[in-house]
């Protein structure tokens, strides 16, 4: 029986599903005499599907024993779960493999987030199979890239709602989700696109935390577990008031960085509250050698010029619990001030000052009804703004000021209804229906050219999305399950395109400035099969058809974009992009050998991308073609493309050693992307492979791992250069233990040291627009300590 199921049964009643959304994965080890055959509890994930399997116990009125009853109260749970069935302590360092989903899910549990650190999601996920980060400004702006797809094809959500911000509008923009305040990260491929929208063709990165509590904290020892604040049964209104706290602190040598966070949870009776605050600061980070490939004349003094960062944030939230459910809300403030490395950024002292205020509401209700199992909803409203600041004239320090402003006001509501399973004779069928609506208003005014045609990258524009979706799961037998899902959405956009001379448009026809109001109705569907295989393995096959509507930046851009060093020309005549994909996977989550292997193929019709023309521009059309112009002219265009690749990772517990387990692990991933004529899609990650050794016991984790990235020579025809390969060597030692509260009040501690890039290699990220001017950080050590009170 899994840790999550035992825990859910013990907590009882309405809390069963609510706890699932916040549960940190637990990885347990068998007693010492049988450590070589470790049994790993199931990993709990919440992002892939709106269908959540509920824990059940036999009903007293089950008749022939073919029916089950949902657990509804604490007394019934106590009968079903003896007190002796206490959950095993989770084991850190065990590879989390998800086998109950229809496509690959990469999970980064709480303990790993604490050990690895990273200021951005792209930094944290940089070395995961099939994933990397954009690394425009390492530590400050790095958006996850999945299987070579990014921005408009990778969704990022926090606690079920869009992360918002402006990271999909420019690679220099930060993702307003900080790992310091995050408890678990899930990277979901496959059918998740149908739950979150057509802009998630490549996948979804989902971050979760406890800012909207889904259970009342309890200080009772019987409920204390690793990885989360303690929980108490929702059905009991007599829960005593309780306060739990956690501190997260780390220091890094490569950038002289300091980070710290405090998380508080309290509650009693029918109420629970959460508060957190965090902050980090870094200096220019150390690099192994000279960063600029095409200019050897600039002093750097062993550090990447203009790479310092500072960020902070805070959040408060609370929930009210009632019979069968809860409703809660939170308000979060994210602030970040960071510099942009690279020659242009260093010359102009470019930095970005960003601020986001976000309000979230979510809830869940399990009615006492025959047809409806659960009703869930999420709502979010975001007010985001950042200023891009720098010198207008590098030689004049008095010319410092705001060069560009981005704003994003976004609202979203998503509701899901999960129906009770019913017997369709050939299978047990469970259905979930969802409805989603969102509105976004964008602007990018520029003080440099007020009142002119090129007043920023685009005029204010807005878009509205309305969608409905359905997921159906079929349980043919305990070993065979299937899923069929579909989504239809309607997208309306409103914006303005400027005058475009004929020479700069794909069809050679001049374009007159006019308001544009395009609308699209993308339709998508998927089908998947899960089959239990011998040896504890699970096989999956998924086929998808996903349509994506063009986004505002692809339709309405009309000027210089410093982040990508391009002069962007939007194409208001873009049509729907279509992706047809197949994915096959085999996974094994239990026993001494755990692994997951996946291969995939995706064909894109009308793939939207920036087509570099080979012409250079400065600030306006008149400058295009001028010798010495700094920006590559790029027209948003469409072509058919093919993506194919595979991912593999495994972990083998070799045997017992010094009271623990030692073993080996390895990984491999590659993606190859070409247009229909055989030329290369730009900015694709290289093939990577690596491995290492580890040792762990109930308290200690020691690991050494080497990841080799091959050279990337499959580059675009125009304006992309090859990237050299590299070796990334990491080592870590961490210690986790419970403490005597009489010491200084803490009940648990985790501390450790992690060494990064220990070979001090020159690492350039092939997917980064600034890779020829920005090196990844050199050799460094990160020391961290977490305490729970």
Image (spheres, rainbow, N blue to C red):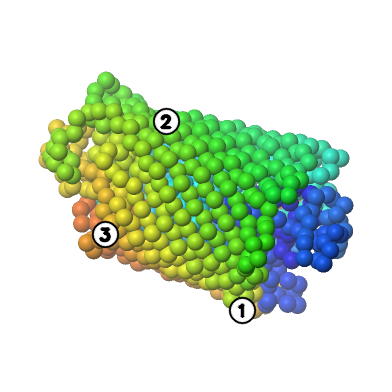
Above or below: residue 110 compared with residue 567 = below
Instruction: Look at the picture and state if 99 lies above or below 451.
Output: below
From the image, which quarter does the N terminus lie in? Answer: bottom right
Residue drawn at the location 70% of the way across and 42% of the way down: 365
Label number found at residue 535: 1
Q: Residues within 10 Å of mark 1 (few under 14, many from 20)?
A: few
Secondary element under disc 3, as helix, strand or loop, is strand
* Nearest to N terminus: mark 3 or mark 2: 2
Q: Return the residue nearer the eye: 665 or 595.
A: 595
Q: Which mark is residue 441?
A: 2
- In-image side of 234 versus 360 (left or right): right
- The spot of residue 105 in percent (x, y) is 53, 60
Residue 312 appears in the figure: no
The secondary structure type at the circle numbered 1 is helix
Residue where numbered disc 3 is placed: 675
Q: Disc 1 or 2, which lies upstream in sequence?
A: 2
758 and 177: which is toward the camera? 177
Q: CA distance from mark 1 to mark 2?
A: 52 Å
The residue lying at 34 percent from left, 60 percent from top is: 603
Which residue is pictured at 60% across the width and 73% down the height?
Answer: 532
- Dot 3, how many residues are within 10 Å of its Cα: few (below 14), some (14-19), or many (20+)? some
Where residue 66 appears, as percent x and y from the top left, is 77, 65
- The location of residue 587, given as percent across then percent down, is 55, 70
């Amino acid at each position: 029986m899994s840790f999550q199921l035992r825990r859910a049964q013990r907590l009882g009643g309405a809390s069963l599903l609510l706890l699932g959304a916040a549960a940190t994965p637990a990885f347990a080890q068998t007693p010492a005499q049988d450590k070589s055959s470790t049994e790993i509890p199931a990993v709990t994930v919440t992002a892939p599907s709106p269908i959540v399997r509920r824990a059940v116990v036999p009903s007293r009125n089950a008749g022939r024993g073919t029916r089950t009853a949902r657990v509804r109260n604490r007394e019934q749970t106590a009968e079903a779960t003896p007190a002796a069935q206490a959950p095993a302590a989770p084991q850190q360092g065990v590879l989390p493999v998800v086998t109950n989903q229809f496509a690959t899910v990469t999970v980064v549990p709480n303990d790993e987030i604490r050990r690895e650190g990273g200021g951005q999601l792209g930094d944290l996920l940089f070395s995961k199979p099939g994933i990397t980060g954009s690394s425009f400004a390492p530590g400050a702006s790095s958006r996850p890239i999945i299987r070579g797809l990014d921005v408009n094809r990778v969704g990022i959500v926090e606690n079920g709602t869009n992360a918002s911000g402006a990271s999909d509008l420019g690679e220099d923009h930060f993702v307003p989700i900080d790992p310091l305040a995050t408890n678990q990260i899930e990277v979901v491929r496959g059918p998740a696109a149908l739950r979150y929208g057509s802009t998630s063709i490549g996948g979804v990165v989902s971050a979760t935390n406890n800012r909207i509590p889904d259970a009342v904290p309890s200080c009772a020892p019987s409920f204390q577990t690793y990885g989360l604040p303690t929980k108490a049964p929702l059905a009991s209104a007599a829960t005593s008031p309780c306060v739990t706290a956690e501190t997260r602190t780390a220091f890094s040598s490569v950038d002289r960085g300091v980070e710290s966070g405090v998380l508080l949870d309290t509650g009693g009776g029918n109420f629970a509250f959460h508060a957190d605050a965090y902050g980090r600061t870094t200096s220019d980070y150390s690099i192994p050698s000279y960063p600029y490939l095409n200019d050897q004349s600039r002093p750097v003094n062993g550090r990447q010029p203009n790479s310092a960062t500072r960020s902070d944030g805070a959040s408060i939230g609370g929930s009210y619990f009632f019979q069968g459910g809860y409703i809660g809300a939170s308000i979060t403030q994210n602030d970040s001030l960071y510099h942009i490395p690279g020659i242009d950024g260093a010359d102009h002292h470019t930095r970005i000052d960003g601020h986001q205020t976000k309000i979230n509401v979510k809830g869940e209700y399990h009615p006492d009804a025959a047809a409806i199992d659960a009703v869930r909803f999420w709502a979010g409203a975001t007010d985001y703004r950042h200023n891009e600041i720098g010198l207008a004239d590098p030689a004049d320090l008095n010319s410092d000021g705001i060069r560009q402003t981005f704003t994003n006001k976004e609202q979203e509501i998503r509701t899901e209804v999960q129906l009770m399973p019913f017997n369709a004779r050939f299978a047990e069928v469970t259905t979930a229906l969802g409805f989603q609506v969102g509105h976004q208003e964008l602007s990018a005014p520029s003080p440099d050219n007020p009142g002119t045609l090129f007043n920023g990258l685009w005029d204010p524009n807005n878009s509205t999305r309305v969608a409905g979706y359905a997921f159906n799961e079929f349980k043919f037998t305990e070993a065979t399950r299937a899923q069929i899902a579909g989504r239809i959405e309607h997208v309306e956009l409103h914006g303005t395109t400027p005058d475009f001379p004929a020479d700069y448009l794909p069809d050679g026809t001049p374009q007159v400035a006019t308001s544009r109001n395009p609308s699209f109705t993308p339709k998508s569907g998927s089908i998947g099969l899960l089959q239990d295989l011998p040896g504890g393995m699970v096989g999956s096959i998924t086929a998808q058809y996903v349509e994506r509507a063009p986004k505002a930046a692809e339709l309405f851009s009309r000027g210089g974009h410093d982040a990508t060093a391009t002069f962007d020309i939007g194409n208001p005549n873009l049509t729907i992009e279509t992706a047809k994909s197949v994915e096959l996977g085999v996974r094994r989550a239990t026993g001494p050998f755990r692994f997951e292997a996946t291969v995939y193929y995706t064909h894109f019709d009308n793939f939207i991308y920036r087509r570099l023309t080979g012409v250079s521009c400065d600030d306006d059309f008149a400058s295009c073609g001028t010798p010495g112009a700094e920006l590559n002219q790029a027209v948003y265009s469409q072509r058919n493309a093919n993506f194919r690749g595979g991912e593999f990772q495994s972990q083998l517990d070799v045997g017992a050693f010094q009271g623990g387990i030692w073993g080996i692990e390895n990984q491999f991933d590659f993606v190859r992307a070409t247009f229909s004529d055989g030329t290369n899609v730009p900015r694709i990650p290289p093939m990577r492979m690596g491995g290492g050794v580890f040792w762990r016991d109930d308290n200690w984790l020691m690991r050494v791992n080497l990841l080799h990235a091959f050279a990337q020579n499959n580059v675009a025809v125009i304006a992309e250069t090859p990237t050299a390969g590299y070796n990334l060597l990491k080592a870590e030692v961490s210690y986790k233990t419970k403490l005597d509260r009489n010491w200084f009040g803490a009940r648990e501690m985790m501390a450790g040291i992690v060494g990064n890039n220990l070979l001090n290699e020159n690492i350039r990220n092939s997917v980064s627009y600034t890779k020829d001017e920005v090196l990844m950080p050199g050799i460094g050590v990160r020391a961290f300590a977490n305490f729970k009170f």
